[in-house]
Image: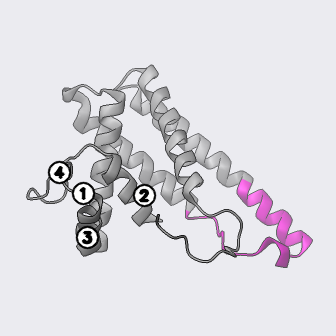
Amino acid sequence: MKKIILTFFIIYGFGLNAQRSDYDWKKMDPKQRKEVINNLSPEERKDLLKKFRNNMIMDNLNIDQSDKAEFTQLYNEYLESQKQIKSQFDLKSDPEKLSDEEAKEKLQQSFDLGQKLLDNRKRYADKMQQVIPCQKVLKLFQSEGMMRDKMNERKPHGSYNTQGPRQSP
């Protein structure tokens, strides 16, 4: 999934000299980009994705140059805290194998998690408004939703993929 997201950002995105200065992402064809990405370490891929994501957000929101560093730090803190909250929920259990009590407990945990995520989002929205206007914070959250929807469109539907691996055209 991370490779798909990374490839998406690179293909659509911004031709930035991200991890290494000798790569001109805009001039590379998709096959070259894929090869370069495949040769990166997992940590380098993560850094590259983070850089592309941050640059995309900055461009999309038209953040003033003087606010970019502070906003980038705050935005990365926000994403990390959301990730940390999400990691508290175990998605691996099969709901159909749970007893009624276990399922009720798991459902309540999901509601609690959702509330924690919402509370965290509100807290960071307040912090972000100290750096950028409220309209841009709203636009940020809207664009996050659109990106999430785009990624979900690319995922195979259902818990079992009966058609086998997806083939590239």
| Percent position of residue 117, x then y | 59, 47
Sequence-wise first label, 1 or 3? 1
Sequence-wise first label, 3 or 2? 2
Element marked by disc 2: helix
Q: Which residues are magenta?
A: 87-110
Residues at marks 4 and 1 touching, judged by CB atoms closer than 8 Å: no
The amino acid on which the numbered mark 3 sits, given as a three-letter code, is: Glu
Q: Is residue 43 on the magenta stretch? A: no
Badge 4: how crowded within 10 Å, few (<14), some, or many (20+)? Answer: few
Q: Residue at x 19, y 28 (%)?
A: 65
Question: Residue 24 or 48: which is nearer the viewer?
Answer: 24
The amino acid on which the numbered mark 4 sits, given as a three-letter code, is: Lys
Sequence-wise first label, 2 or 1? 2
Q: Is residue 108 on the magenta stretch? A: yes
| Percent position of residue 62, x then y | 30, 26
Which callout, 1 or 3, points to the residue nearer the camera?
A: 1
Q: Residue at x 26, y 36 (%)?
A: 70
